[in-house]
Amino acid sequence: MSTQTLAQLRQLKLGGMATALQHQLEQVGTYEGLSFVDRLCLLVDQECLSREQRKHERLVRQARFKLRASIQEIDYQHPRNITQKKIAGLAQGDWINRGQNLLITGPCGSGKTYIGCALGHNACLHGYSVRYHRLSRLLLALTQAKADGSYHKQLTLLAKVQLLIIDDWGLEPLKPAHRNDLMEIMDDRHGQMSTLMISQLPTDQWYASIGDNTLADAILDRLMHNAHRLQLKGESMRKILSQLTQDEHLG
């Protein structure tokens, strides 16, 4: 009967309950003193935990982060103009609930992408949908979507993502069609969903990088209005970590 019940639970997609029941059956003498309701509560609790974990794993997988990053692993020892208090505040996710944006800028190797991915991963753990894109690849995908007829579908998908992370903003000049694509994205998301932008360029150079005054005004107004900012400074973290590794080997 127990084997049949376990199989039925799995057929009903109650894998967490099935695992918990199997554990109870294997631990002879541990659960017999509990009432039926207490044992049932343990099974239901395990099913809820299992579903929550699967949801988090699905959100992280769908986000397609460039890096496996965690806010607990962010380096504060080397001065980069970031504080644990600032990161902890962003990790709470209030800005995502309000549809506000976050702009992370800093020199090459300063850890911008790591921090962005860490905040994105943290958002997944809080149940938010997240997508990570390098700007060049996102614009290429939209160009291809125009050719195969899925452009509006792709824009709709981007508009629904609760946190959209766009990396490498401003590395390459924007083509006219790409400016229009960005305008569509920012207009759909403005005030509704959050965008996390990562760039080597200081924000005061973003206007010139867009290349069209009218569209630059429209895009940046939607992106920068009420946006939170992290302006990283200091030496390249890659250089620092590389030097530390060399020193360890020498030691």
Image: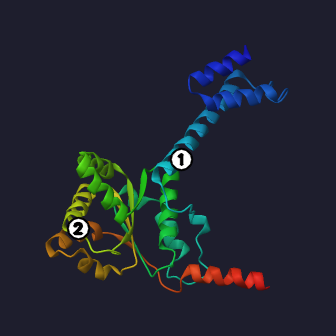
Residue corresponding to mark 1: 56
Residue corresponding to mark 2: 219
Q: Is residue 32 left or right of residue 58?
A: right
Determine whether 222 is above or below 236 in the image.
above
Residue 183 position within the rendered picture, expressed as x and y whole percent measured from the top left: 22, 62
| Quadrant (top left/top right/bottom left/bottom right) for the C terminus | bottom right
Residue 22 position within the rendered picture, expressed as x and y whole percent measured from the top left: 73, 27
- Residue at the spot x=34%, y=59% of the render? 138
| Quadrant (top left/top right/bottom left/bottom right) for the N terminus | top right
Q: Can residue 79 be seen in this view?
A: yes
Q: In this view, does 144 lie to the left or right of 122?
A: left
Spatial CA distance of label 2 from label 1 is 32 Å
- Residue at the spot x=14%, y=72% of the render? 214
- Residue at the spot x=53%, y=63% of the render? 67
Alpha-carbon neighbours of circle 1 within 10 Å: few (<14), some, or many (≥20)? many
- Residue at the spot x=51%, y=57% of the render? 121
Residue located farthest toward the right when viewing the structure as drawn: 29
Alpha-carbon neighbours of circle 2 within 10 Å: few (<14), some, or many (≥20)? many
Q: Which amino acid does label 2 sit on?
A: Ile
Nearer to me, 197 or 26:
197
Residue 185 position within the rendered picture, expressed as x and y whole percent measured from the top left: 26, 58
Visual colour scheme: rainbow
- Mark 2 and mark 1 lie on one chain; the one further toward the N terminus is 1
Q: Residue 240 carries which label?
A: none
Q: What residue type is labelled 1?
A: His
Q: Can residue 192 be seen in this view?
A: no
Residue 140 position within the rendered picture, expressed as x and y whole percent measured from the top left: 32, 59
Residue 101: image quadrant is: bottom left
Mark 1 element type: helix
Residue 149: image quadrant is: top left
Residue 216: image quadrant is: bottom left
Determine whether 76 is above or below 45 in the image.
below
